[in-house]
Amino acid sequence: MNSGSHAKIIDGKALAEELRQNVTLRAAALRARGITPGLAVILVGDNPASQVYVRNKVKACADSGIHSVLDRHPADLTEAMLLARVQELNNDPAIHGILVQLPLPSHIDAHKVIEAISPAKDVDGFHVASAGALMVGQPGFWPCTPYGCMKMLESIGYELRGKHAVVIGRSNIVGKPMALMLLQKNATVTVCHSATANLKSITLQADVIVAAVGKRNVLTADMVKPGAVVIDVGMNRDDAGKLCGDVDFAGVSQVAGYITPVPGGVGPMTITMLLVNTLDAAERT
C-alpha cells in the first residue's frame, strides 16, 4: 500500500457550484426571451428522506432562477389521481420538467407513473424512451446521478478511452445507465452485482470504479489497484449515524488516485444535473 500518498479528492460541491453558475446564466438568457424554465416536483406521502431531497431540489431551482412547483399529496392519494395530475403537468406549457419523487406508496405502480410522464419532460431520465435513447446514443435525458458521475470524471480531465471501468450495482437509476455512458466514452465496462463471484478479482483490474449498491464498505482498500479513480454513489449511515458511502473512504483513499467523498461528492452533482436537464428541456421548447 502506498501509504505515503493520498488520493486526490473530486469535490462534488465545488464542481456543482461551478456548473450551477452556468445554469443561472442559461436560465437568465431564457427569461430574457420570455421563457421561465419550470420544474414540477411531485411528492406523495411523508417519507422523511424524500422530504429532504425534495426541499433541496426546490431550493436549488430557486437559487438558479428556475421556477419550481412543489406538488404535495397525502400518502393515500390514488394511482388514478396521480396519473391525472401528471397528465395535467404534461399539458402545462409553463412546466418543462416533471419529477416524481421515489419511492411512491406501495399501492401506486411507480413504473406506470413514470411512463405517464411525457418523454419531453422526463428530466429524471427514468422513462423507457429516455433509457432507449441512451442505449442507442440518441439525444434524450440522462439520469442525473450517473450523468453527474460523468461530469466528475470530465472535471479531472480523465480520458476513458480504452480504460477498464467497473460498475458495482445494476439499478435502472444508476448502475445500468452508468455502464452505458462509460461505454459511450469508449471504456471497457464490467458490471458487477450481488450475484458476481469474486468481486475483488474484478475490481483489482479496474482503472475506474463506480460503487452504487447502497451498502457500506462494499469496496475496501485491498480491492483497489493503486491510482484507480473511485466514485462513490452510496448514501448510507455508519454506526454513529453519520452519512457515509459504499466505499471504505479511509482505507481506499490511501490507494486510489482520485476519490469522491460522501457527503460532498456525487450528491450535489445529482441535483445540479437535474437543473441542467430542466434547462435543456426548456431550451428545446
Image (spheres, rainbow, N blue to C red):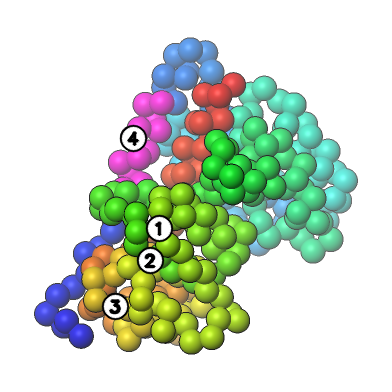
Name the residue carrying label 2: 164
Asked if labels 1 and 2 touch by Cβ distance under 8 angstroms, the answer is yes
Residue 89 placed where, x, y %?
A: 72, 32
Earlier sequence position, callout 2 versus callout 1: 2
Question: Gap in Å between the C-alphas at discs 3 and 4?
Answer: 36 Å
* Label 2 Cα crowd, 10 Å radius (few <14 / some 14-19 / many 20+): many
Find residue 225 and name its label.
Answer: 3
Question: Which residue: 30% across, 41% down?
Answer: 18
Q: Nearer the viewer, mark 3 or mark 4?
A: 3
Earlier sequence position, callout 3 versus callout 4: 4
Q: Where are the magenta residues, as a range?
A: 13-26
Q: Nearer the viewer, mark 2 or mark 4?
A: 2
Find residue 21 and name its label.
Answer: 4
Q: Residue furthest left?
A: 4
Question: Gap in Å between the C-alphas at discs 2 and 1?
Answer: 6 Å
Q: Amino acid at mark 4?
A: Gln
Residue 99 to residue 91: above or below: below
